[in-house]
Image (cartoon, rainbow, N blue to C red):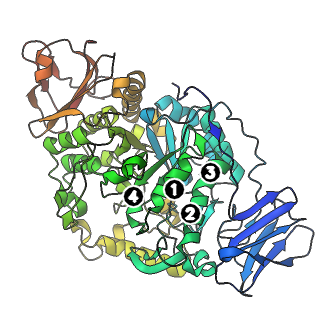
């Protein structure tokens, strides 16, 4: 397997705007503190007395000084208007946690070994989402390096790291980060992250970093204290006031966030970003911040790093090119595929699932276009949702059958494979990994991990108690938790045991039935890698249709290559007629009811000549290769 293109990746020159950056004559400290009357830099070096240095104001609320005898490893903090010393909002590392002093880090000191890395081809992208803390027994960047050969051999091409920005306590999903530039000390030091990315590149794996710009966590968020314009009451979000992108003082906020995006690309050699919940980035400016981030990141290297967004609105504008007025993102997380499949296999009816029937017709429509909602009224939202994606490539829709949100936001953190019929699950995985969109796997999915992915935190006592109470209130409307005392079954997010229960058990991947699920994922990804027709598509549409309420068929094509036909029955048994098969010339490449994949195989009976029928004994999928035209 290779991701190489014609030449190795070339990075453009980069000068950080904010933070403590070692320079030729010492360390340059730059802090955005508009409205401050005085800023003092407190420095602490081993073997020397603590001291304070006056910081000079410059234009537009930026304060700057260069300290000649400062060096990497020094600790520092800022006192604004003679207040308490606070960590740097652009700190590169918080060795003592988000409440402690910052450490000066030299981002140029690491000796990179990825000079031959050529970047990520979006057409070959298969994303693997992981949480560093629960991915391995060690829960660190270094521990994750040991698993990179397994991910390469699985067939994924890009690792998406759940948010790394440091958070309060020892554990968190990462979406409560408050030190935006500092990889969490829970996972290791900054050079440990660099070593992880370096090793990933040597294994032909790209690395995407999940970044959260729509809010700050509830504990240790000193940024608004130093820059009161960081938040605005002009807009409201689920977390309170919005990050200020279009109110007075927003220019410096936007600069800080763009600087943050670029720092992951330049200082850590990340291959792209996944922007969290962009629907909560409220921006009425002439040009949306997300479009500005995309432009800046795309210009940071050649070939361009990629920018994806998590956004439930199905807005084509986000993935259209700038020449057509779009934001020029490389893709968006497209939830419709997951919701249709989950409704179809699990009968889910609550929350946003009320918008889906969960039948083959909806699945075929999703496969045909990239997402299902193109302007229809959403019962859940109480308004129309979505736009027509027929003007953009299908590869720009990122789809999954599970991810951290769809698993971890369930009360018990259960994965769909814990309750869905295994035969139906194999069929769903086959559709995912042969679809024309960009597929995403969640860590452990590849072997149907028995472990849940629960919601876990480690806040201080006061905030922690509110989190536990809020978590249990959240599920009171669900029938299984409505009875008095039933909410006590929901694991305590603050408990060590909740975090430990979410840690993957890698030894089970080699035991039945997990090894059969792993074999299916590997073989499907091998087919996707070897056949251009099965890779993420530049086409605007896919030939997909429903056969009854339970079966879907779709065809994949590539110039000069044999076409591929996928027929998947996701529920029940029975005989289906497939007109394309009746013409002949198709031969099975893979069926989910082979001994290698099913502990108790029940192969479908295929009549690939006159009748063109498949008799499914139970749910399953067949992948056919046609003759080359």
Mark pair 3, 4: CA separation: 20 Å
Number of residues whose C-alpha sits closer than 10 Å to that of mark 1, classed few (under 14), some (14–19) or many (20 or more): many
Q: Of helix, strand and loop, which one carries label 2?
A: helix
Instruction: Relative to 146, say whether 473 is above or below.
Output: below
Question: Mark 4 sits on what residue?
Answer: 408
Residue 197 got which mark?
A: none
Depth check, mark 3 against mark 1: the one in front is: 1
Residue 619 in sight here:
no
> Sequence order check: which comes first, mark 3 or mark 4?
3
Question: Mark 3 sits on what residue?
Answer: 140
Horizontal side, residue 107 vs residue 481: left or right: right
Depth check, mark 2 against mark 3: the one in front is: 2
Image label count: 4
Whether pointer 2 and pointer 3 mark residues with C-beta atoms closer than 8 Å, the reply is: no
Residue 293 got which mark?
A: 1
Q: Of helix, strand and loop, which one carries label 3?
A: loop
Instruction: Relative to 130, say whether 498 is above or below.
Output: below
Which quadrant holds the C terminus? top left
Mark pair 2, 1: CA separation: 8 Å
Number of residues whose C-alpha sits closer than 10 Å to that of mark 3, classed few (under 14), some (14–19) or many (20 or more): many
Q: Of helix, strand and loop, which one carries label 4?
A: helix
Whether pointer 3 and pointer 1 mark residues with C-beta atoms closer than 8 Å, the reply is: no
* Residue at image location 17% in from the left, 48% down from the top: 358
Q: Of helix, strand and loop, which one carries label 1?
A: helix
Mark pair 2, 3: CA separation: 26 Å
Question: Mark 2 sits on what residue?
Answer: 257
Q: Position of residue 530 (x, y in %)?
A: 41, 21
Depth check, mark 4 against mark 1: the one in front is: 1
Quarter assignment of residue 25: bottom right
Whether pointer 2 and pointer 1 mark residues with C-beta atoms closer than 8 Å, the reply is: yes
Number of residues whose C-alpha sits closer than 10 Å to that of mark 2, classed few (under 14), some (14–19) or many (20 or more): some
Q: Position of residue 201 (x, y in %)?
A: 61, 36
């Amino acid at each position: 397997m290779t991701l190489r293109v014609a030449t190795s990746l070339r990075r453009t020159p980069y000068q950080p705007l904010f933070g403590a950056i070692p320079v030729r004559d010492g360390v340059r400290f730059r802090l955005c503190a508009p409205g401050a009357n005085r800023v003092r830099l407190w420095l602490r070096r081993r073997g020397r007395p603590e001291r304070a240095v006056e910081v000079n104001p410059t234009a537009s609320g930026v304060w700057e000084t260069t300290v000649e005898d400062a060096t990497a490893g020094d600790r520092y903090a800022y006192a604004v208007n003679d207040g308490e010393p606070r960590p740097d909002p652009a700190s590169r590392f918080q060795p003592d946690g988000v409440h402690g002093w910052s450490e000066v880090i030299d981002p140029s000191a690491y000796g990179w070994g990825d000079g031959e890395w050529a970047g990520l081809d979006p057409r070959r992208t298969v994303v693997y989402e992981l949480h560093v803390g629960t991915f391995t027994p060690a829960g660190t960047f270094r521990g994750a390096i040991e698993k990179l050969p397994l991910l390469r051999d699985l067939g994924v091409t890009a690792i998406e790291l759940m948010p790394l920005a440091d958070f309060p306590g020892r554990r968190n999903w990462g979406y409560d980060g408050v030190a935006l530039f500092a990889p969490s000390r829970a996972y290791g030091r900054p050079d440990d992250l660099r070593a992880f990315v370096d090793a990933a590149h040597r294994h032909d794996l790209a690395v995407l970093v999940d970044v959260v710009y729509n809010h700050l966590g509830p504990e240790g968020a000193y940024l608004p204290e130093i820059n009161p314009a960081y938040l605005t009451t002009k807009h409201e979000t689920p977390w309170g006031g919005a990050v200020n992108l279009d109110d007075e003082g927003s220019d410096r906020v936007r600069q800080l966030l763009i600087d943050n995006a670029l720092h992951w690309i330049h200082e850590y050699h990340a291959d792209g970003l996944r922007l969290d919940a962009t629907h909560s980035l409220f921006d009425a400016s002439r040009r949306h911040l997300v479009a500005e981030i995309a432009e800046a990141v795309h210009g940071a290297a050649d070939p361009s790093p990629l920018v994806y967004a998590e956004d439930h609105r199905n807005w084509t504008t986000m993935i259209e090119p700038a020449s057509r007025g779009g934001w020029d993102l490389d893709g968006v997380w497209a939830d419709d595929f997951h919701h249709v499949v989950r409704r179809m296999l699990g009968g889910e009816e609550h929350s946003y699932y009320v918008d889906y029937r969960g039948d083959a017709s909806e699945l075929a429509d999703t496969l045909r276009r990239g997402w299902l909602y193109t302007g229809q009224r959403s019962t859940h939202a109480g308004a129309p949702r979505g736009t027509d994606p027929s003007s953009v490539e299908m590869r720009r829709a990122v789809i999954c059958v599970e991810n951290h949100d769809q698993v971890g936001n369930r009360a018990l953190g259960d994965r769909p494979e814990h309750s869905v019929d295994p035969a139906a699950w194999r069929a769903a995985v086959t559709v995912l990994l042969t679809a024309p969109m960009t597929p995403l796997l969640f860590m452990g999915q590849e072997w149907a991990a028995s472990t849940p992915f629960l919601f876990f935190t480690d806040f201080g006592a006061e905030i922690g108690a509110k989190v536990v109470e809020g978590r249990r209130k959240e599920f009171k409307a669900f029938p299984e938790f409505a009875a008095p005392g039933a909410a006590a079954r929901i694991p305590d997010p603050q408990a060590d045991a909740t975090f430990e229960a979410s840690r993957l058990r890698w030894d089970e991947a080699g035991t039945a039935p997990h090894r059969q699920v792993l074999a299916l994922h590997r073989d499907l990804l091998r087919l996707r890698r070897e056949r251009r027709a099965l890779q993420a598509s530049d086409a605007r549409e896919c030939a997909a249709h429903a056969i009854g309420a339970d079966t879907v068929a779709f065809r994949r094509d590539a110039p000069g290559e044999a076409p591929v036909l996928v027929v998947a029955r996701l529920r029940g048994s029975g005989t289906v007629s497939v007109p394309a098969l009746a013409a002949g010339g198709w031969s099975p490449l893979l069926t989910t009811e082979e001994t290698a994949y099913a502990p108790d195989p029940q192969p479908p009976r295929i009549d690939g000549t006159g009748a063109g029928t498949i008799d499914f004994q139970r749910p399953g999928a067949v992948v056919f290769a046609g003759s080359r035209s």
